[in-house]
Amino acid sequence: MDFSLSGEQRQIRDTVAEFVDEEVVPRAAEIDETDEFPADLIDEMADLGLMGMPFPVEYEGAGLDYHSYAIGLSEIARGSGGLGTVVAAHTSLAGNMLYEFGDERQKEEYLTALNTGEDIGAFALSEAEAGSDVPAMSTTATADGDGYVVDGGKLWISNGSVADTVTLFAKTDPDAGRKGISAFVVRPEEDDGFVVEGTEDKLGDKGCPTAELRFDDMWIPEERRLGEEGEGFVQALKTLNGGRITIAARSVGIARAALDEATDYAQEREQFDRPISDFQAIQHKLADMDTKVRAAELLMHEAADLKMRGEDFIKEAAQAKLYASEISREVANEGIQIHGGYGYTKDFPAERFYRDAKLSEIYEGTSEVLRNTIAQQLLDE
Ligand SMILES: Cc1cc2nc3c(=O)[nH]c(=O)nc-3n(C[C@H](O)[C@H](O)[C@H](O)COP(=O)(O)OP(=O)(O)OC[C@H]3O[C@@H](n4cnc5c(N)ncnc54)[C@H](O)[C@@H]3O)c2cc1C
């Protein structure tokens, strides 16, 4: 078993890390404070090919494998958890829906614009009454001439208020449960009846707008349907399985940032005439934090590698996200503890890492739902 990164993977990591250290880290506190979508940083990332990392060059993607993409995303999240979500929702969710289930014309038209960063993507699945229970959704798409009329609303949609392309899930057959769900491409600028109700004021993940969307008699042409009617639920699950690998990567990135910051602080802060890193209690915290980050990284690499090779990865992706998100919150918590009172203030980024880490335990499958998935996979084996 070879655990080393390939030359290309190392190059991606180093290139993104350099960009993040120079451009993102110095802006991270400001993004957290203002909660504004960092459009200028997204433009810079697009120039570097970071808005379409895992997609082929024929659609203006960077042509990287999924594993390299996860490594790149982890570095972005090390700089800003919110930026990590912007890229993950845009790429792993909206981009992958188009890449996996779009026809040639849809890919050329919509995926290409996402990959160049000209367009921003969002993935609209969750509703007020349908979070973990996806088939409980009530948004409908009713056949109407050579298209559909969409009515309903979506909640918690990352990038939802800034998106140019929204991959939307709605019921085309409300009596058919999960088999009655279909997926569509929605273009907010073109589709009358698309309304942004507002954005959430969240604990963390700032800079990535989380929007509530409403659709009032919104007509969309049939050619914007992704795949066949009734395939939406399976398409969503497949997309989320891949997405979980990148939420594991986001978690690892945030945990790494918390560990690096705590390691530096422990060597600078003096109490009792010595750096606090001299105390074994602090050393043990750092040792546990590093061990957890490395274990999460290995799970993330394994799941990404399996997906890249086209092998089954559902259980591994769920385990990577479950473990990485939980240790990310634990590591960030210990980061605050090592900073003492200063860690509880906005003078240091330790508290931001904690707020950003928490989210990964909730979206793209809560920890409880992931444990259900893992157990199901185990019992089916
Ligand atoms: C910041 C943010 C960004 C998001 N971005 C997106 C996005 O871009 N697109 C999108 O579609 N959605 C998005 N979501 C929605 C997210 O995926 C849901 O919040 C999540 O799936 C949980 O749904 P819920 O909030 O309705 O919680 P619920 O499903 O109501 O869950 C509440 C609690 O019950 C538990 N629970 C529920 N069902 C079970 C079960 N079967 N077994 C055990 N426990 C269970 C849950 O684990 C949780 O602890 C986002 C959410 C947030 C907070």
Image (cartoon, rainbow, N blue to C red):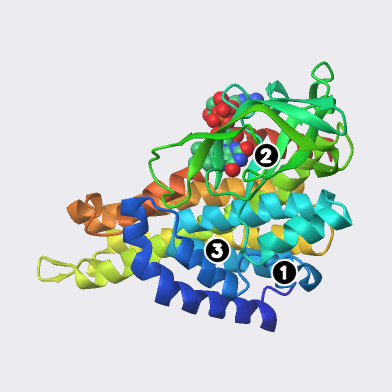
Q: Earlier in the sequence, mark 2 or mark 1?
A: 1
Q: Secondary structure at mark 1?
A: loop
Q: Position of residue 138 (x, y in %)?
A: 68, 21
Q: Earlier in the sequence, mark 3 or mark 2?
A: 3
Question: Dividing the picture into quarters, in which one does residue 87 lie?
Answer: bottom right
Q: Mark 3 or 2, which is nearer the eye?
A: 2
Q: Which residue is mark 3?
A: 74
Location of the C terminus (image quadrant)? top right
Depth check: give the residue in front, 269 or 180: 180
* Disc number for residue 61: 1
Amino acid type for the residue under numbered disc 3: Ser
Q: Position of residue 228 (x, y in %)?
A: 89, 38
Q: Is residue 291 visible?
A: no
Q: Is residue 116 visible?
A: yes
Q: Is mark 3 within 8 Å of ligand 1?
A: no
* Disc number for residue 191: 2
* Disc number for residue 21: none
Q: Position of residue 55 (x, y in %)?
A: 75, 65
Q: CA distance from mark 3 to mark 2?
A: 34 Å
Residue sitting at 48 percent across and 76 percent down? 19
Depth check: give the residue in front, 320 or 240: 240
